[in-house]
Image (cartoon, rainbow, N blue to C red):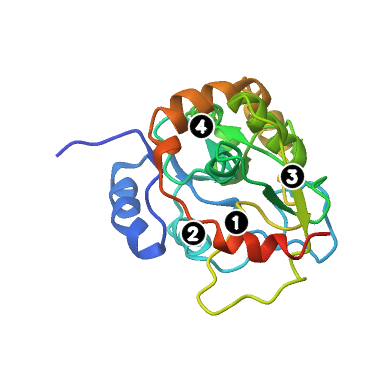
Amino acid sequence: GASFDAVVDNWSKSPELIKPYAEAAKGWGVSNYAYVSSAGMYTPEKGDFSPIDEECAKKSSSQRQAEELIAEMDLPYSYFRPQYIYGPAQGESYLAFFFDRITRDRPVPVPNDGTQLVTMTHAADNAQMIANAIGNEKAVKQAFNCATSSLISYADLVKACAGAAGKDANIVNYDPKGFEKPEGFKFKFPFRDTPFYVSADKAKDLLGFAPKFNIADDISWYYSDQYAAKGGLDKELNFDEDDVVLGAKV
């Protein structure tokens, strides 16, 4: 019997999952349905490594279909498309890949030359961006890339992780197309082989968004409070597939 002025949906991953919440929101007459989607839907043109804005071409992913559904329902939506998030209570960790190898004195495989840029965004900055949108008419029927404006290269990120762990960074650059993947091969670098990062300029202009966190400053906290404190040093890991990748070093 309750009703709400706004909805923040950080759970639905498909049109089927979002529909009942969207219908409820429609009945309540909410001022905003803030849907946390994904930047993984972007499909920039091959060879275009410039910052990706919200108008970039998109694949018809399940989250893109969820976005389209709430637009078709004429809800006062705002889409938020996060990319490479870190923070407390994190599910998938993009940084564990690096710490797993660094803390075990293993080489860290990095595709191509390691100069590719990436945005690593603290969850609290994402939350602040969404909060800035609630009750803000400028946010209605708009999409926003949910990311920091600071960039870091793959190589520098590995070095930062190594520094936090008190280790030396042993980076081995590999050719992602230079080896044959055996059947059942599961090795996966946490980011794309090529640069892939979004622009948060729209959120800055319309929502007054300004990130407060920076991965370079947070990496020591992440290592101690997230990776080590949650058993990262005690995991049993197998690096046989790494050896296949490292055989294709640049």
Foreground disc of the pair 1, 2: 1
Mark positioned earlier in the residue sequence (3 or 4): 4
Left or right side of 47 for 182: left
Label 2 vs label 3, nearer the camera? 3
In the image as oriented, which residue stretches furthest toward the left? 1
Q: Which residue is mark 3?
A: 171
1 and 2 marks in contact (CB < 8 Å): yes
Name the residue carrying label 4. 123
How many C-alpha atoms fall within 10 Å of the one at disc 3: few (<14), some, or many (≥20)?
Answer: some
Left-right relation of 113 to 33: right
Disc 4: CA contacts within 10 A as few (<14), some (14-19) or many (>=20): many
Residue 63, numbered label: 2
Label count reads: 4
Which label was assigned to residue 1?
A: none
- The image quadrant that residue 185 belongs to is bottom right
> CA separation, marks 2 and 3?
35 Å
The residue closer to the viewer here, 175 or 213, is: 175
Please name whichever residue, 158 or 91, is drawn nearer the observer in this view of the structure. 158
Q: Earlier in the sequence, mark 2 or mark 4?
A: 2
* The C terminus, quarter of image: bottom right
Q: Is residue 68 above or below residue 125?
A: below
Question: Residue at position x 76%, y 40% from top?
Answer: 155
Residue under label 1: 40
Q: Nearer the viewer, mark 3 or mark 1?
A: 3
Q: Residue at x 68, y 56 (%)?
A: 192
Is residue 208 at all visible to an observer of this figure? no
Q: CA distance from mark 3 to mark 4?
A: 28 Å
